[in-house]
Amino acid sequence: MILLDRGYTQPRKYEEYAYVLDFNSKGRALTVRGRDGIIITAIGEDRLTLLEILGSEDSVFDVGEKIYIGKEGRTKVQSVLGKLDYEQISSSAQSELSTVVQSIVENNEQRFVDYVNNAQPLTPRKHSLELLPGIGKTYLKVIIEQINKQKFTDYKDLEERAGLKEPVHHISKRIMEEITGVTQFKLFVKK
């Protein structure tokens, strides 16, 4: 769903789906004072932001489960309470995060392959693909040459033609760096 912020022309985007990192059936919200119940820590599928969610009474959740959090037709979720910083989430959620991020990168292959195909230079000396762990000047040159011949179709194509082993791992690692605050410049995680 897209809403317009007052005074801005940019539409405001909301997550439709999130993946459960942790939940507490008798929890107290961090982001909204006085809210308690089934408190879920999750990561949004599209914007990759950490979220605090209030689950519907008597709902059951599993770590790693994909849940619908869009505006219309929620069944297991009462409301999205707010965004969380990495430091605010439980150690259990922190330990699940990399596995869930990898799952998101695997399940949204076309989105991340499109990112590689359409990535642009940041400055005359630095290309945005160089911000992915494992991609230096040598891989960058090969990737750009291959894109100029024909865009990549999937991760396997990227591995075979560019020689980049385990692209899911490299992209997942970058997302983790953005979420944990290791890097301030964001390629994938949205505010």
Image (cartoon, rainbow, N blue to C red):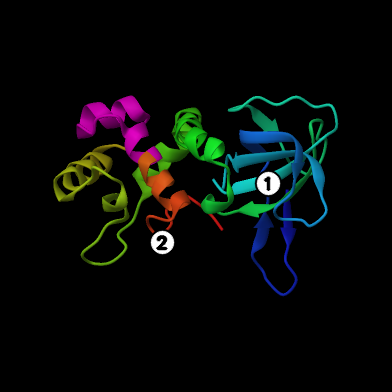
Residue 155 position within the rendered picture, expressed as x and y whole percent measured from the top left: 35, 29
Q: Residues within 10 Å of mark 1 (few under 14, many from 20)?
A: many
The relative height of residue 190 versus residue 148 in the rendered view (above or below) is below
Instruction: Please tell me which of labels 2 and 1 falls first in the chain.
Output: 1
Report the residue that reaches farthest toward the right.
57
Please determine whether, in this image, residue 125 is positioned above or below residue 48.
below
Q: Is residue 152 visible?
A: no
Q: Which residue lies furthest to the left in this view?
A: 138
Q: Disc 2 designates what residue? A: 184
Q: Residue at x 19, y 31 (%)?
A: 163
Q: Quadrant of the C terminus?
A: bottom right
- Along the line of sight, which residue is nearer the eye, 26 or 143? 26
- The residue sitting at 25% across, 44% down in the picture is 148
- Would residue 159 be counted in the magenta stretch? yes
x then y, percent, for residue 82: 69, 53
Is the magenta region chiefly helix, strand or loop?
helix
Lateral position of residue 85 relative to residue 158, left or right: right
Q: Which residue is drawn at 56% across and 54% down?
A: 85
Which disc, if any, is residue 52?
A: 1
Task: Count the labels in the image.
Answer: 2
Give the x, y percent position of residue 131: 30, 52
Magenta range is 153-172
| Residue type at tag 2 | Gln
